[in-house]
Image: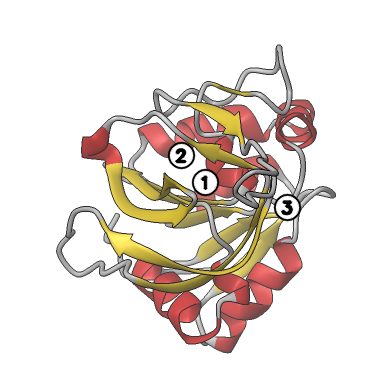
Amino acid sequence: MTGNCIGVVNTSVSNSLSVFRALNWLNLNARLVTEPTDLKKFSHIIVPGVSRFDSLMNEINSTGFTNELQNAKESGKAILGLCAGMQIMGKSSDESPGCKGLGWFDFKVKRINSSSANGVRNFHTGWNDVLEYQRLPSFAVGGCYYFNHSYYVDKFSKDKVIGVSTNHITFASVIRTENILGAQFHPEKSQKDGLNFLQAFWQIST
């Protein structure tokens, strides 16, 4: 393996294969990664997630991915977290009290509260718009994407947010700091806009 390549962290609690297939559709150089030390070989890394906060954190902790992801972050590799893969980049989650996240962002993940009065459900599933909160050079995040989550990033440092969405409440749907990027939606399920998002991630220089 030479040159730039995307490593997709392959855990038993994520949809890593779906992400991998989307990257293949784009003809991007990508590999599924099951051995944590192999992350050293990749210029770009994706952490998928369709799982509980603690399930994903416990697996990456027990398999040794946590230390290797931290090393990758510190070495300046581009890292993208998707859905739960984004949420674990924060400090903690209401979904899993007592379980610590990676702590790369200063946020705590909150539960979506339902309300019979206004018809708000305690989950957010389906298509929704992402509006640019701030524009980054060569990375337009605005578009329509597929979401499926019951927890969200509520309070956040506004300088780290580049995209927001609204589902009764407004929440951070795309975050970024330096070489770290997180998306609450599933680009691999979001057709053209999702593929464009993955392509833009690939073009981040490392």
Instruction: Determine the residue positioned at 46% across, 39% down.
Output: 72
Q: Residue furthest right?
A: 12
Instruction: In this rendered view, identify the residue nearer to me: 89 or 38.
Output: 89
How far apart, in angstroms, are the residues tagged by discs 3 and 2? 22 Å
* Secondary structure of residue under mark 2: helix
Q: Quadrant of residue 115?
A: top right
Which residue is denoted by mark 2 in the rendering? 72
- Image coordinates for residue 42, horizontal then vertical, percent: 49, 56
Labelled pair 2, 1 in contact (Cβ < 8 Å): yes
Compared with residue 43, is residue 155 higher up or lower down, i.e. above or below? above
Going from N to C along the chain, the mark reached first, 3 or 1, is 1
Mark number displayed over residue 50: 3
Q: Quadrant of residue 136?
A: bottom left
- Residue type marked 1: Lys
- Residue type marked 2: Ala
Mark number displayed over residue 154: none
How far apart, in angstroms, are the residues tagged by discs 3 and 1? 25 Å
Going from N to C along the chain, the mark reached first, 3 or 2, is 3
The answer to whether residue 42 of the structure is visible from this angle is no
> In screen coordinates, is 9 left or right of 199?
right
* Secondary structure of residue under mark 3: loop
- Residue type marked 3: Val
- Image coordinates for residue 80, horizontal then vertical, percent: 47, 52
Instruction: In this rendered view, identify the residue nearer to me: 66 or 58.
Output: 58
Compared with residue 171, is residue 156 higher up or lower down, i.e. above or below? above
Can you say which quadrant of the picture contains the N terminus? bottom right
